[in-house]
Amino acid sequence: MLFFYEALREDNNALANTLKSGIYSTPAGRFEQKEIKKYGFTHRRTNGNFTYINTSQEISIKAQFDWVEPFSEGMAAVKMGYKWGYIDKTGKLIARLQFDTAEPFSEGLALVKINNKYGYIDKTAKLIIAFQFDDAKSFSSGMAAVKIADKWGYIDKKSKIMIPAQFDDAKSFAEDLAAVEIANKWGCIDKMGQTKIKF
C-alpha cells in the first residue's frame, strides 16, 4: 500500500486508525529466505504446483511445471526453471525446454525467443522461421508483425517480407486490417501495405 505520510493525519487520523486496526496491527515477523525460495520460480525448483484439469475438474496432467499457459491449437507453453517448452494434451513434451519466451500457437506456428532473437516453430518443435527478428508478434490472418532493427514490417509463413519494415510499431492483423504507428501517429493498413485509415 502506498500513501503520503500527511494523509495519515487527515480527518482526525482516519487513515492511521484504519491501518492500525488491520494488517499493520501485527509486527512484520521474521524474514525467512527458505519461504521465499519455496514459492519462487528458480532453477532449484523442479516440481511446481501447476497442473491441468478437464471440464470435470479431474487432474489430466500431473503437476510438474513452474508455470503453465492455456492450451491453444492443442499445445500449451510450459516453464520449468528459466526455460519454456510445449506439451500436448497428454502432457508429452514436444521439445526440450529451451526457449526464453514462448507464445501460444496461432495458425500452426508459435513465436519463440532464444538469445534475444525471435523465430517460429511448428507443432513438432521444428524451426520454421529462423531466429532473426528483434521482436515479433504471433501470426494472424496469415501474416506476422516483425521488428528488424528499429522498424516493424510483416512477413508470411515462409518468412517472405510482405510489407517492408517501416513502422515505429505494429499490431497483428484482424479483419484484414492492422494498426501501425509512424511518428507517434496511428493508422491502419491492409495486407498490401496500403493505408486504409489515415495516421
Image: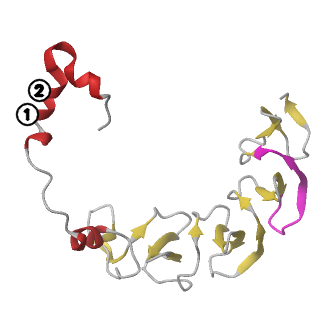
Labels in figure, total? 2
Q: Is residue 157 magenta?
A: yes
Cβ–Cβ below 8 Å for labels 1 and 2? yes
Is residue 76 shown to the viewer in this render?
A: yes
Q: Quadrant of residue 123?
A: bottom right
> Relative to 98, is 31 above or below?
above
Say which of 35 and 109 sits in front.
35
Q: Quadrant of residue 159?
A: bottom right
What secondary structure is found at the residue carrying circle 1? helix
Percent across and percent down for residue 93 are: 49, 83
Q: Which mark is on residue 104? A: none
The residue singled out by tag 2 in the image is 17
The residue singled out by tag 1 in the image is 21
Give the CA distance from mark 1 to mark 2: 6 Å
Which residue is rendered at x = 55% and y = 83% of the image? 94
Neighbours of disc 2 within 10 Å: few (<14), some (14-19), many (20+) = some
Check the picture and name the quadrant holding the N terminus.
Answer: top left
**Main SS type for the magenta part?**
strand
Neighbours of disc 1 within 10 Å: few (<14), some (14-19), many (20+) = few
Q: Quadrant of residue 10?
A: top left
Percent across and percent down for residue 27 are: 10, 49
Please state if 199 lies on the left or on the right of 64 as rendered.
right
Which residue is rendered at x = 15% and y = 20% of the image? 13
Q: Residue furthest top?
A: 11
What secondary structure is found at the residue carrying circle 2? helix
Span highlighted in magenta in the image = 155-169
Disc 2 residue type (three-letter): Asn
